[in-house]
């Protein structure tokens, strides 16, 4: 563990603020939320995780987050993919029933397609999530998607890194066929059949 000192009278981090580096193994005493010192991207780690590079900027230094402070990613937009991934056309072709679906690349390099039922769908890292994304870049309660007669909408569920729709940070946004949601390191697409 490294510590960073600050000059007297500075509004910066305290001299005892914990600093951690990419590749460092997290022990039972260290799990929790950390933020990238370069861009503010927040990650949450379990006791058995290894600290990754920042998925947002590639940074390698992280500071433990205060449980009382709010941290937001230092950006209002992200780059969207120039072209949809190749697997998306295949996923769309396999949709047999009319409805709204979420499609995303899974941890194994394949893809997952989830049919949205009317009402709320919880997305996050929590075991209580309807769409479980087990990655430290995803908050336990990251986002909600709601299907109503009026259409499909997405809501940021007080996540640390925010919800992005088609590259723009949103709190609450309507979704249409082909829209791209960025939730942590995941790019999730809304498909309508």
Image (spheres, rainbow, N blue to C red):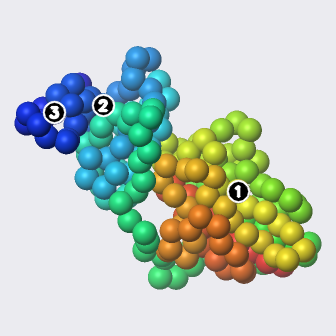
Give x and y (percent) for residue 35.
36, 43
Q: Residues within 10 Å of mark 3 (few under 14, many from 20)?
A: few
Return the residue at label 1.
144
Return the residue at label 2.
24
Going from N to C along the chain, the mark reached first, 3 or 2, is: 3
Return the residue at label 3.
4
Q: What residue lies at 77% left-to-right and 72% top-to-bottom? A: 152
Going from N to C along the chain, the mark reached first, 1 or 2, is: 2
**Image position of 76 with respect to 60: above or below:** below
The secondary element bearing badge 2 is classed as loop
The secondary element bearing badge 3 is classed as loop
Between circles 1 and 2, the one closer to the viewer is 1
Going from N to C along the chain, the mark reached first, 1 or 3, is: 3
**Image position of 101 with respect to 71: above or below:** below
- Name the side, left or right, on which 162 lies relative to 53: right
Q: What residue lies at 65% left-to-right and 72% top-to-bottom? A: 173
Q: What residue lies at 31% left-to-right and 55% top-to-bottom? A: 39
Q: Are marks 1 and 3 in contact (CB under 8 Å)?
A: no
**Image position of 135 with respect to 111: above or below:** above
Q: Residues within 10 Å of mark 2 (few under 14, many from 20)?
A: few
Which of the 4 image quadrants contains residue 193?
bottom right
């Amino acid at each position: 563990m490294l510590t960073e000192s600050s000059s007297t009278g500075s509004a910066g981090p305290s001299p005892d603020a914990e600093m951690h580096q990419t590749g460092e193994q997290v022990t039972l005493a260290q799990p929790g939320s950390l933020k990238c010192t370069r861009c503010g991207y927040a990650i949450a780690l379990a006791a058995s995780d290894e600290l990754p590079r920042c998925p947002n900027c590639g940074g390698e230094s992280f500071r433990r987050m205060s449980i009382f402070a709010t941290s937001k990613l230092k950006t209002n937009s992200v780059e969207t993919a120039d072209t949809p991934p190749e697997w998306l056309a295949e996923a769309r072709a396999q949709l047999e029933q009319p409805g709204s679906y979420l499609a995303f690349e899974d941890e194994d390099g394949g893809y997952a397609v989830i049919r949205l039922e009317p009402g709320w769908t919880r997305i996050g890292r929590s075991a209580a999530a309807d769409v479980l994304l087990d990655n430290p870049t995803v908050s336990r309660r990251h986002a909600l998607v709601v299907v109503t007669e009026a259409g499909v909408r997405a809501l940021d569920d007080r996540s640390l890194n925010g919800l992005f729709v088609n590259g723009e940070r949103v709190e609450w946004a309507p979704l249409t066929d082909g829209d791209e949601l960025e939730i942590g390191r995941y790019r999730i697409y809304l498909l309508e059949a």
